[in-house]
Amino acid sequence: MRLKGKKAIVTGGASGFGEGIVRAFVAEGAQVVIADLNSDAAAGLAADLGERVYVQTVDVSVDGSVSTMIAASNDMLGGIDILVNNVGIGHLPQGLEELPEDEFDRIFSVNAKSVYLTARYVVPIMKKNGGGAILNVASTGGVSPRPNLTWYNASKGWMITATKGMAVELAPNQIRVNAINPVAGNTPLLATFMGEDTPEIREKFLASIPIGRFSTPADMGAAAAFLCSDEATMITGIAMEVDGGRCI
């Protein structure tokens, strides 16, 4: 129960890594708001997990939607101790010069601008309450980029740099900011990264992971629960690889 009494928001918490983080947080005693565009999936997960789980529908790339979600979550929970910026999108493998501009804009709106928007509204609450923890879900692609995913990799590299900048600036306010860098996992984004899901392509992906398997939502949940707990009060500004050794 390392998060007992903590009040958390997890964006993109209805599926994939976000669901794993929500499940871990609830198991560790937190109250959690699942903030997701897919309200039906979020409601289903909340019903499965019980009375300490709430739902807010949000488009993390839109200022008004984010501000409304943060305000409602703050009222619902009676404060915000933890924010997990988990929501993210990718693009199909292609030459960097081939990605359409509107798709580029969408990737950076969801993967990068969302971190800026949530910070605008969560940081004042955390400052007023004397501290908190923010966790950004980046990617091994931000550290060791794969070819033909350049603009996705760049968005996650941005997130890692933002994490370090936020950590330095907010440390005097006792707000810790960290990131985790997952390797590819069995989530809805996997097929996007691979282009097509075939045994051959899966084998190629797995060959780059020394531990020999894809990451799981439970892996991310365990890492997130630790970094957002009071056990990690001296840890800020890191981007921890949860990658089975891929970035070695």
Image (tube, rainbow, N blue to C red):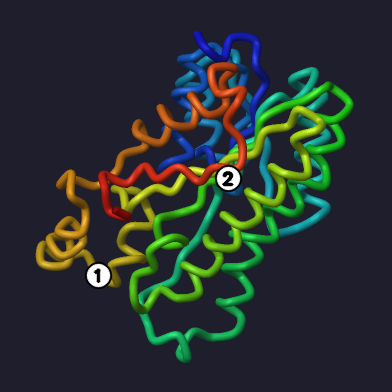
Vertical placement of 146 versus 170: above or below? below
Check disc 1 and report the residue beneath it.
Answer: 196
- The answer to whether residue 195 is left or right of residue 168 is left
SS under mark 1: loop
Earlier in the chain: of badge 2 and badge 1, it is 2
Mark 1, Cα crowd under 10 Å, few <14 / some 14-19 / many 20+, is some
Residue 197 in the figure: left or right of residue 200: right
248 sits left or right of 150 in the view: left
Residue at the spot of label 2: 136
User: At label 1, which amino acid type do we have?
Assistant: Glu
Q: Report the front residue among 3 and 245.
A: 245
Q: CA distance from mark 2 to mark 1?
A: 27 Å
Instruction: Examine the image and state in which quarter residue 232 appears.
Output: top right
Q: Position of residue 75 (x, y in %)?
A: 82, 24
- Which disc is residue 102 wearing? none
Residue displayed at 61% across by 70% down: 106
Residue at the bottom extreme? 97
For the point 80% across and 18% down, the residue is: 78
Please tell me in which quadrant of the rendered image residue 4 appears. Answer: top right
Helix, strand or loop for disc 2: strand
